[in-house]
Amino acid sequence: MAGVSALRIADLESELMQIFQGAKIPLTKQIVDLPLLNNANVFYIGEISLGSPPQTLRTIFDTGSSNSWAFTRAAYAALPESIEKTERFSQGYDPMASSQSNPPSYEHSVKINFGSGSLAGDFGTDMCTLGDLGSDKTIELAGFKFGFVVQENHIFSNFDALVGLAYPKMAHKGVKPLFDQLIDSKQLE
């Protein structure tokens, strides 16, 4: 893994400019401390919180995908018995524990293949919080639309969520990347 660095969202402006096709995105609303571990500028490891009350999830911030996904309790329950459910597996995000969760109906389930495995689920919404929950340096996004993973194969063994940072054109129809949703909510200008 590349060197460890603690980044603030405000420090990512130049990278965000590349992601958002060169648009200048001043982050004037709030400074948020979001420590990230950089892996060769391909992906970053950090935390987001989903739900109300918040459930903190170890997260991959992935520059090669646009959708966001959370490993759910249903996915944990669906793990094959042959897989030892050790501490490396979180029990996952629990939409039933959140007062703001709007889980999907699963009528239009999606299956996505990655180079390292696959996942299946559908898109719903919940509160997303970025930053240190114990401070006033957070951004909250109500109605954050992301994938609720109900089945996976070799994707979520060391983390609980994936946040796609790539172009909106790469996202599933009707779904926007997290930072586009933050722009739409006027959290980013």
Image: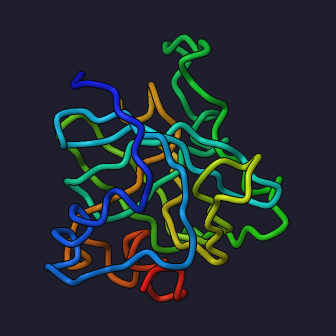
**For the image shown, how many numbered marks are present on the structure?**
0
The one nearer the camera, 165 or 116, is 165
Work out whether 153 lies above or below 88: below
The one nearer the camera, 64 or 140, is 140
Task: Point out the image quarter for the N terminus.
Answer: top left
Work out whether 159 lies above or below 3: below
Task: Point out the image quarter for the C terminus.
Answer: bottom left
**Residue found 48% across the figure and 40% down from its top:** 35
Percent across and percent down for residue 170 are 21, 71
Left-right relation of 119 to 46: left
The one nearer the camera, 1 or 51, is 1
Percent across and percent down for residue 101 are 73, 67
Left-right relation of 60 to 54: left
Percent across and percent down for residue 153 are 37, 34
**Residue found 40% across the figure and 71% down from its top:** 179
Res 17 → quadrant: bottom left
**Residue found 22% across the figure and 45% down from its top:** 114
Way the structure is coloured: rainbow
Res 166 → quadrant: bottom left
Left-right relation of 115 to 187: left
**Taking the image as drawn, is residue 152 in sight?**
no
**Taking the image as drawn, is residue 142 in sight?**
yes
**Residue found 21% across the figure and 64% down from its top:** 14
Percent across and percent down for residue 34 are 50, 48
